[in-house]
Image: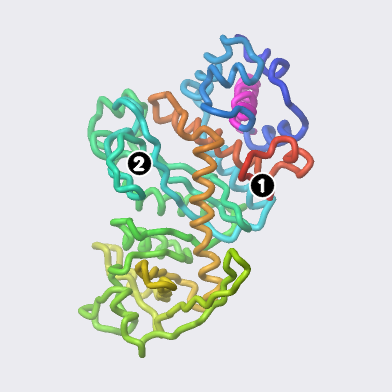
């Protein structure tokens, strides 16, 4: 089907989506690329259920042959996803007031072994072993929302070493040997170099991360502020102490004389108020050296501990470089990661991130980029436009 038929056949166009397309997809030089992109974007926003090229074509009121064009746009068209994602991040920064970067993990269950990056893994949230792809989603947090503006596909096991698999999936050589810590610090470096994006703290959950020290070291080298939840046994070194005095965050706060307590008031769902104690370490600490060349001993962190009110769950701990911020402000930033988890749930339910059926590395990134574009468009659409198309759980900023 000629791509020129897409614009007239697809229902529901308008100035709003055209403006968005012109801004975000301005790197597309060929008109047919923009037409297929607009059809794909419209279907991701409006189509309920599974987002496959065939169902997208039918939702757009296109002939069945258009499914092949949509498939080719994602899997074979050689467009670069980096510029599109950077423009999405810039649009979010210009249309809202972002206060943090954050990252969430996405597990994508798969059948078979040929989808790029798929293998059997333990899902850290459920503890079950699943056949899946594992991805990191990078968010700009603004207000109560998180906007997905970056993606990394984690390649490990055979996908990191099998040259034949990598060749068939068109995985670039630059992706070999990259750990989750490399993806996080690499993305942070890339975003810090964008002049139109603000310098913001990174809010991370490192409680299940084997490379927590490496992540913190990489962000410290960039001078990035952090608010990171860590496990109770995260090694730290109290400032001014001998290197042999390395301890853990939980052990350090066991001594009452080493901590201050701040009581915060929180409103319950029934309208009542409860007292929430938060302990802070009286001094600062450094993260112990994770390896050669990663000496971050001079970088001071503050420790926050929030005990479980009823004592049924372990206490939670955060490390932050924001040593001069109020406890309330730090914990408010920490909540950005919770908002990112809600955004991941919406991406799964409404924007088709589980539905990519191709096998190539570029195709996977193209599909996820379009899902991000659909999410950002839906959230930032003008109120009169959003009233007609807003999906459950997605509110315009």
State the image quarter where residue 18 is shown: top right
Identify the mark nearer the N-term, 1 or 2.
2
Foreground residue, 130 or 309? 309
Q: Is residue 234 left or right of residue 300?
A: left
Residue drawn at the location 49% of the way across and 73% of the way down: 322
Q: Name the residue under label 1.
A: 395
SS under mark 2: loop
Kindly identify which residue carries mark 2: 154
Q: In this picture, which residue range is highlighted in magenta?
A: 26-44
Quick one: label 1, few (<14), some, or many (20+) residues within 10 Å? some
Prevailing secondary structure class for the magenta stretch in the rendered image:
helix
Look at the numbered disc 1 and give the secondary structure of its residue: loop
* Residue 201 image position (x, y, % from top left): 51, 63
Verify whether residue 39 appears in magenta: yes
Residue 54 inside the magenta-drawn segment: no
Q: How far apart are marks 1 and 2 (CA)?
A: 30 Å
- Residue 253 picture location, percent across and down: 34, 80
Residue at left 50%, top 24%?
Answer: 74
Q: Which of marks 1 and 2 is in front?
A: 1
């Amino acid at each position: 089907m000629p791509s020129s038929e897409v614009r007239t056949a697809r229902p529901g166009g308008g100035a709003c989506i055209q403006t968005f397309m012109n801004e975000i997809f301005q790197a597309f030089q060929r008109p047919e690329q923009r037409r297929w992109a607009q059809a794909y974007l419209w279907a991701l926003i409006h189509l309920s259920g599974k987002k496959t090229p065939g169902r997208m074509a039918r939702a757009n009121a296109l002939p069945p042959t258009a499914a092949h064009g949509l498939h080719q746009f994602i899997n074979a068209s050689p467009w670069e996803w980096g510029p599109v994602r950077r423009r999405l991040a810039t649009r979010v920064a210009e249309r809202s007031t972002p206060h943090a970067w954050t990252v969430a993990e996405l597990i994508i269950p798969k059948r078979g072994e040929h989808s790029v990056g798929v293998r059997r893994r333990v899902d850290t949230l459920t503890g079950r072993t699943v056949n899946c792809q594992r991805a990191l989603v990078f968010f700009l947090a603004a207000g109560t929302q998180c906007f997905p503006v970056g993606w990394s596909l984690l390649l490990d096991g055979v996908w990191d070493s099998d040259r034949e698999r990598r060749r068939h999936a068109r995985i670039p050589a630059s992706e070999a040997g990259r750990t989750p810590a490399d993806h996080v610090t690499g993305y942070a470096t890339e975003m810090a170099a964008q002049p139109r994006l603000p310098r913001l703290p990174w809010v991370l959950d490192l409680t299940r991360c084997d490379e927590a020290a490496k992540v913190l070291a990489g962000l410290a080298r960039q001078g990035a502020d952090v608010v990171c939840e860590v496990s109770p046994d995260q090694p730290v070194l109290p400032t001014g102490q001998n290197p042999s005095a390395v301890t853990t965050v939980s052990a350090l706060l066991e001594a009452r004389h080493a901590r201050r307590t701040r009581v915060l008031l929180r409103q319950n769902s029934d309208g009542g108020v409860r007292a929430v104690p938060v302990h802070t370490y009286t001094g600062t600490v450094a993260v112990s050296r994770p390896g050669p060349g990663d000496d971050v001993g001079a970088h001071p962190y503050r420790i926050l501990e929030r005990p479980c009110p009823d004592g049924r769950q372990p206490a939670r701990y955060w490390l932050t470089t924001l040593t001069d911020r109020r406890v309330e402000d730090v914990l408010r930033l920490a909540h950005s990661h919770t908002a990112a988890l809600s955004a991941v749930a919406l991406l799964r339910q409404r924007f088709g991130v589980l539905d990519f059926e191709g096998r190539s590395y570029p195709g996977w990134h193209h599909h996820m980029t379009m899902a991000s574009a659909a999410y950002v468009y839906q959230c930032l659409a003008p109120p009169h436009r959003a009233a007609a198309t807003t999906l459950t759980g997605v509110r315009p900023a």
